[in-house]
Amino acid sequence: MTVPEVDARASECLELAVQLATRNVADGGGPFGAIVVTSDGAVHHGVNRVTRDNDPTAHAEVVAIRAAATAMRNFDLHGAVLYTSCEPCPLCLAAALWARIDRVYFAADRHGAAAAGFDDALFYEYFAGNQPELLPVAHRGIPSSVVPFDAWRSAQGKTAY
Ligand SMILES: Nc1nc2[nH]cnc2c(=O)[nH]1
């Protein structure tokens, strides 16, 4: 069942994300825009800044999540919604999970991104186990690997996340 007010808000927010994405292309950036609406109703913008900042992690969604967390002075964005011009890539989806965002709405999908030359769909294939050669990852369980976790478990006054 759909809730009309929620759906109206989603369309409006997605339109804004798409406008940010389009404007970002005119400004010399990638064609991605996102907003995070936090639990207090504030709207936090993000656009893709990868090439401008030489930061491969500066995807629109990540930039919006960082802006929201900074403004909220909290790494936990429980109660927030992410609206993005394009389906979050695995990096952006992981950022939303770590931020404890409640829900995600997207406009274009990974196949639209692929048609524009972006590897979002390919990286989903990697995580599905279908493209292992893209990035070989090896486990070497050296004995000291447990030391940081032991330190964490016994740390007093830590901030868990
Ligand atoms: N969803 C999304 N996919 C991307 N692929 C490359 N950059 C981006 C981005 O900023 N957002």
Image: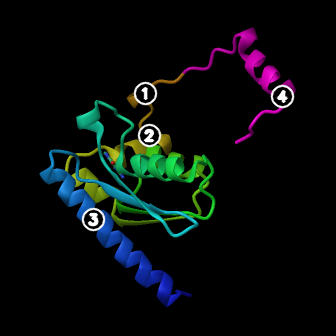
Queried whether the magenta region covers residue 80, the answer comes back as no
- Where residue 46 appears, x then y in whole percent? 36, 53
- In the image, what residue type sits under mark 4? Arg
Earlier residue among tags 1 and 2: 2
Question: Which quadrant of the structure image shows residue 144?
Answer: top right
The residue stretch that appears in magenta: 138-161
**Which mark identifies residue 1?**
none
**Circles 1 and 2: CB distance less than 8 Å?**
yes
Mark 3 is on which residue type? Answer: Val
Q: Residue flagged by tag 1: what amino acid is it?
A: Leu
Say if mark 1 contacts mark 3, CB within 8 Å: no
Distance, label 4 to label 3, CA atoms, is: 44 Å
> Residue 103's quadrant in the figure?
bottom right
Task: Give the Cα distance between marks 4 and 2.
Answer: 33 Å
Position of residue 2 relative to residue 80, above or below, is below
**Horizontal and vertical percent for residue 18?**
27, 65
Lower position in the chain sequence, tag 1 or tag 4: 1
Quick one: label 4, few (<14), some, or many (20+) residues within 10 Å? few
Q: Secondary structure at mark 1?
A: loop
Where in the figure is residue 39, as x and y percent of width and height? 58, 66
Viewer-proximal residue, 139 or 5? 5
Residue beneath disc 2: 126
Contact? badges 4 and 2 (CB < 8 Å)? no
Mark 1: few, some, or many residues within 10 Å (few <14, many ≥20)?
few
Q: Which residue is mark 1?
A: 135
Residue 18 numbered mark, or none: 3
